[in-house]
Image (cartoon, rainbow, N blue to C red):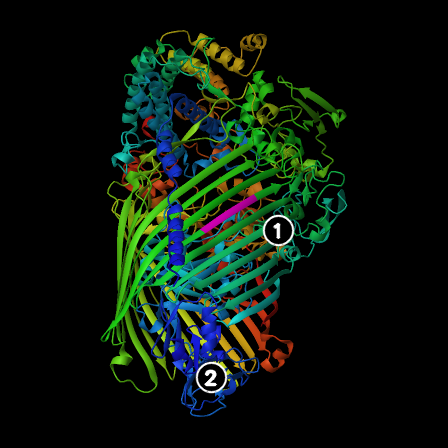
Amino acid sequence: MLKTMKKTNYYFWSLWPDVNFNKLLLPVKIVVALLLSGLALPAFSLSGENLKSSSGDLLRVVPELQQQKIVVSGTVTDPLTGEPMAGVNIKVNGTTIGTISDMKGKFSLPAAIDPNSTLTFSFIGYVTQEVAVAGKTVIDVTLVNEVTGLKEVVVTALGISKEKKSLAYSVSQIQTEDLVKAGSTNLMKSLDGKVSGVNLTSLSSDPTSSVLVNIRGTTALPSTSDANVSVKGQPLYVIDGIPVGNQTFTSKNGVDFGNILSQLNPEDIENISILKGGSAGALYGSDGGNGVVMITTKSGRGGRKGIGVSVSSSATMDSPYQFIKEQQQFGQGERAYEWQYDNTDTWGPALDGTYVDNFWNVKTQKWDNGPMRSSGENRMKEYLQTGSTVTTNVNISGNYDKGSFRLSLSNMDNSGVMPNTKTNQKSITLNSEYNLTDKIKISASSSYVRTYSPNKANVAGSNSILNSLLFNFPTNLQPLSDMKNYWMTGFEGILMNGAIQKDNGIDKSETNPWWRTYEMINRFSRDNFFGKLQLDWKLSNAFALMLRTGMDNIGENYEYRQSFGNTAFASRAVSGDGQFVTNSSNSVNFNSDAILTFNKSVGKFDISAAGGVNYAYSNSNSYSVSAGALSVPGLFTVANVFPGKLTAGYGWGASPSYSVYGTMDIGWAKQIFVGVTGRNDWKGNLPEEKINYFYPSVSAAWVASETFHMPEMIDLLKVRLGLANVGNGLIRSRSIDTYTFDSPDWSGIVKTANINATLVDPDIKTMQSITKEAGIDVWMFKKRLLFDFTYFVKDQNNQLGGIPLVQGTGFTSMTTNIGDVRSKGFEWGMTLSPVSTKDWNWDITATFTHYKAHILRLSPKFAPNGYVFASYDGKTVVKIAEGEEIGNIYEQNPILRVKTGKYAGQPLLDGDGGEFQNSSNEKDRAQLGNYNPDYIVGLNSSLRYKGFSLNIVGSLRKGGKYISVNQQYMESNGRAFTTLGSGPDNPWWMGGRTPALGGLAWPAEGSSAYDNINSNNDNQRSDFNDASYAKGVFLNPDYDGDPAEATDADYIVNGADPNNTFYQFPYNSYGDVIWNFTSTRTYDATNFKLREVSLTYTLPVSIASKFKVNNVNISLIGRNIFQWNASGRNEDPESAFSGVGVNQGILRATLPSIRSIGAKLAFDF
Amino acid sequence: MKPNLTKIFVVILLTGIVSCSKDDLRQYDLLQQKNAVESLNDPYLLSSIIKKSSIFYQDMGWGNTRLPGAAQYTMRNYQGGDNYYSGFKDLPTDMYSAMDILKFIDASIKLSDARGSKTHVGIFTTFRVLLFSFMTDFYGDVYYSEALKGREGILYPVYDKQSDIYTGLLKELDDASTLISSGTETISPTYDLMFAGDKTQWLKFCNSLKLRLLMHASAKMTDAASKIATVAALPLLSADADMNASIAYVGTSTVNSWVGGSNNWGNSGDFEKRRPCKTLVDKMISLNDPRALVWFAPIETPWTNDPLKNGISFATTDPNGYTYSSTWEYVDATNPVIAAQIPNILDVDKVYAGFVAGMNGDFKNGNGHWNTSAGGAYGNFKVSKYSKLFQQNSHSLLRAQIMNKDEVQFILAEAVVKGLVSGNADTYYRTGIRYSMKRWGVKDDDITTYLAQTSIALPADNPGKLAKIAEQKWIALFSVASEAYLDLRRTKLPDIFHNGQLATFTFPLRYRYPGNELGQNRNAYDLGVATLSPAVDDEFSKIWLLQ
């Protein structure tokens, strides 16, 4: 054998080209010497011209070519910038000879090649190009950008990648570069304006706030116990194939601490696929009923060979703008001639300096006497500061023949616009994969993310400092800067120096905002580990097996510390002061899948199928200990609890689920695609809770442009149809009474208990979510115009939930199939590239979203009236009735009006004080509006000139209404400008605070013919002309018949005859009454936001290479630069919530808009 | 190929999948706890029902000002619609609070019945009657026979006629007394917060409640006389040794503290907003009632017509040892601010004065309080506050009351005068006064002195007797305002309906149905409204008891 080999020269190479054996042209004897040296190489046999190993064809030996070979080199350039391209893969077809281009775009093949061979140039984001050598030794190539299009591959359910062309449903995919352009640290916020069919709602303008995602509108039915449908309709999130549940937000003490999504570092995300339709998400079962958001993290695969390091860093300044304005002319009190020191309403005297009174000088901590003047400051503006966000990401990736890895480290420091608030996020992610053999790949990914907030403040709802500054701070109080010393000197940590002190000089009457800032601390940390281990085994050409197990572990710790100072000094001995709450929770979710896939083409048919099993288990526990008051100041421990103020809680939950699923896609002649999926789930812990469900889906797409000859300009025309039926995976609830002991106990020796009764309809049925969609895709002009349109109908039938019962049944609600909700709508997306030249490139993307959801049917067991009002924010209600649109808000307290006659529609004032009255008849409740926009338009413009690119993202939300609780309290507390005087157009009220502002003269004593009017007016009369009255009619006090039968003659118009008018001073008629009626403060929510602007300069390679770096991008970034509100009010209708994610459409004391401006630097080396 | 490595990885993955399988311990926990949380032992049921019912009643009697305002015990010094009945315009949802307790009671009856705890079932039934009687007394026709049957499929229970409810409740009380007597199990003295495990007291409470209900319906029931006579002969909460149907507070948390105490305040203003009503203060002062010193605090700066007393301070210590300091202020007509208040100054040279009935609740109202910048929104210095006793979270004199034994005496006194039972009205009347005074810690000598006054003696004529009995019952029912309101409505005595500013306000006769009834239980609601007179769901329509 050796003898034979001696005769010829051989060279050989590994099957894995990177080993670079091909550089070695070794005489056979050396090979043999190597083989004989005992190295771990298998035994060989010579078979023909091949050197064959006994265990396979590890080495192949071919005869040295007789033909004259040539050495080829050249340069690769970018089509648009004309700059040299580094890192381009160059391969000689049919061989393993290859190389990559260097920093200057130059390449030189390492071995001489056949002059007739063909070279393949490939680079991510560019069309792979083949060039025939044809004897040339220098080959210069300009690559072509890959247009989003024909070959685009999207990640679909179970992590299976599919060619977009073959999909029968609508999927939106956003790539990493679109997420990180504007340097957003919040993954979900960076989606806004970029996807169609999705409504993203930020809980607040804070850059770290949570985002609610509603795909194609929520079809959740409101129930009386929970009318927050926007929270209920959240999609399923899947990270690298592992479902992580329907994420909403973590709210502690009214503070939004985000969720595991808000922790994800956008730089680590490869792409996000949003599976909007039922067919797309059906494989995830009931959890995917609201759509699925698939997040794929970056791996090292596909990058440059060898080690690469990329670094990016950004810093932004976050500054609030659009502050609510309040009147600053009047100070504390109820009437303009009368000062009331501890009344925080500002219906009092004018602050023109003429009124002199005692006041607590917060700065000197003494009682002073002086003229009352306005501080002249906008409290919110004075209080808020410029925040900052600094992020740094470093990642190291390695890409080798046998595998790849990517290690990413990131750090984010956010200093909030609320003083003394901070958030820090750190993450470490390691993704790696390794090819055990050419058929078996294993991959593992792991992440550790930590979020820590030493303090984060409540920025929504009644408990926030903003609420206090807006509504409880009379303008005459000293500037906030004078209040900074919030402890009484000598009593630090014990006695608060209140914004207003009580007349005893010891206790505060109004909390000092700085005390709230520094002594009410919400501390939070979240540690999140998640990862997966996956094995992909290519069993044969047709079959592949995937085994995957993933884990997600979240630990959260929360502490609330409130110092002494809030309880009256005298009461401390009996009730303590301060507060300390600590709670901790831990949850772990496991998800394991085994999936067998099959892919084969038979004739014109392409068949791909997959079948799998899933086992998921979650286990969680939490405990909380609350010291409602402390014994001694400054010691935040549970042991320091004030006697009798300790409460503790402990809870756990566990849920297993087993599923099998399958999917099959058949394509015919690359023009007709049909897909079916099915899934069956088994859920439930206790035997009587166990239940199983099956959900199928079917979809079809027809690429018409493959069937018929299309005009040249049409690249693709596709029609698609989808139908899916997803059942509900809730466990079967039991109809039982359970008892829990009250906490705290009645006394040290006696416990008491409470009953929790659940009533479940014995005839309960499975819930069905049926979605239908039809769409069309058109790609034209060499993909310069891409358009897709989808019409969808999403039915959520037999929804499970509680129907409200009258308490006479002994139950507040019964779990049953409440009814059906249907969401209908359409969405379109369009990408246009009007300019595409070597130097210039301009892409415009527009997205459009429109949907409306209605209640189609209600259970016959529902209220006999067919409707029920679910309480909402206290002043508003939500109606549950057939035909009702989801998102409608009704007034809780309608103004009582005359029903018939010529005064029909006029407010019917009461007969004692001439004030507006509530109508107690539910039928009088009018719809205030719907908080959902009529449509959402997203606009995305990307303009590039050579190395410069300018990206702009904006979104318009048209339509919808919101109710301003701000206005409510500003009216009640005399802060709103409308409370100064009625003016000519006021529909409710006539009069004013002072004669100059329209205040009317009081009638003489006894001037009315009616006792009630005299009695009312006498009670309120002053010699100061501040009379005002409500516009409406009242029943003649002498009329003693049935009010329902009164005729026109029995009514008296208030204000028509000054002697027979019920007058009230403004505080009484406006501040005490009008604010009750929600219809008076409902506003248009239409708004436009310029969400992102970024200007990026990419350093030419020629310059970058001098510094040994690559892909250097320097950006100026801006987010939320500008906002326009149709209502003209300085309120962000998008963050209209009455608390953290509570009661959408109700805006209460939220942060103003926040503009972030900064810079970003990114480079590789 | 490295098949071994592959195998190793497959094994690792499968191990991973299996090892994160279900948590067997949790499965076991679930099954084990299932039984534990679905049942509760008698003592816990008993303490819970007593607590819930007592707190509910005390909240109506004191916590909420709707009924204390209507009975003119308490006037609000701040935003005081309850001073002139406007709380009745709303749709009070107390019916639902009562239903919540009734749900617990019904479930308890089932649990105890299954264990054969007859005495407990009897006690629970007594509370069931108590709460249903509250509902029908205040609203009229309400759920009764179809109530609490959601699990039996009755989702929209209809209302029963009030007359039928009364018949049913009286029958239930008969059953309850039988059960209490026949049960042999012991009652935990510790968990029996009301009668410390004394079965006889429970029996007496059951009978006393029956007497109360029969008196409520005495004008409507043809056989009221015989029924009352029968009950009067049964053991009642009537002896010196008997206890009251009330519980003591612990005072360590909001739930176990006196409803007026600091644990239940948002701030001290919550205490100062509530002032004793002039009607009550004047009546008690005129009768030299020693309870007034227990209940009311001296005015902080009382008015005087004597310029020499101006600025002179004096201290007062009340019977419970709480101290107060007051400073006289001269009605100085030369001071224009005070001169302007003279028409409002009703009480001069008095240490105790009340807030005028039916006044707009406002800091300025009430006896010419003028120093508003010092007083603030509710700091009126010219009208008495309640004594510091009522600021306490717990005190031996402060109890969550359902029924006191003085009430039993007054019912019997009224029944005698009306000829429903035989006996000595004067004895019942005086015993009632004595029990009430002892309940508030008044010494025996002072009681004797009080009773010896001619102003206390019952007149000869029956209407006069009834008025006098009603007056003392009204005083005795202070802080049990729910019963006081029902008596005022039933007997129109004492005649306080035109006091102060109340001349133009109509005394309300019932609660309007809670809003949900109209929306969700329309058929029942309509039928309920139809039996009102007139058939309108407002606070002035008459229910069967008043028709």
Residue A862 picture location, percent across and down: 28, 45
Query: Quick check: is A967 in the magenta stretch?
Result: no
Q: Where is residue A168 in the image (x, y as percent from the top left)?
A: 30, 69
Asked if badges 1 and 2 are on one and the same chain, I answer yes
Q: Is residue A179 left or right of residue B332?
A: left
The 10 Å Cα crowd at callout 1, few under 14, some 14 to 19, many 20 or more, is: some
Instruction: Indicate the position of residue B180 as horizontal and vertical percent values.
Output: 34, 15
Q: What residue type is labelled 1?
A: Leu
The image shows residue B44 at horizontal and vertical percentages of 41, 24
Amino acid at circle 2: Leu
Element type at mark 2: loop
Q: Residue A786 sits in which quadrant?
A: bottom left
Query: In what element is the residue under mark 1?
Result: helix
Numbered label attached to residue A469: 1
- The label shown at residue A143 is 2
- Residue visible at 51% across and 64% down? A406
Residue that protrudes farthest toward the front in the picture? A3
The quarter of the image holding the N terminus of chain B is bottom left
Q: Which of marks 1 and 2 is nearer the N terminus?
A: 2
Residue sitting nearer the eye, B429 or A576: A576
- Confirm or deny contact between disc 1 and disc 2 (CB under 8 A): no
Image mark 1: chain = A
Q: Is the magenta stretch mostly helix, strand or loop?
A: strand
Looking at this view, name the residue that lies furthest to the left.
A603
Q: Nearer the viewer, residue A163 or B353?
A: A163
Say which quarter of the image contains residue A40: bottom left
Q: What stretch is highlighted in magenta?
A: A552-558
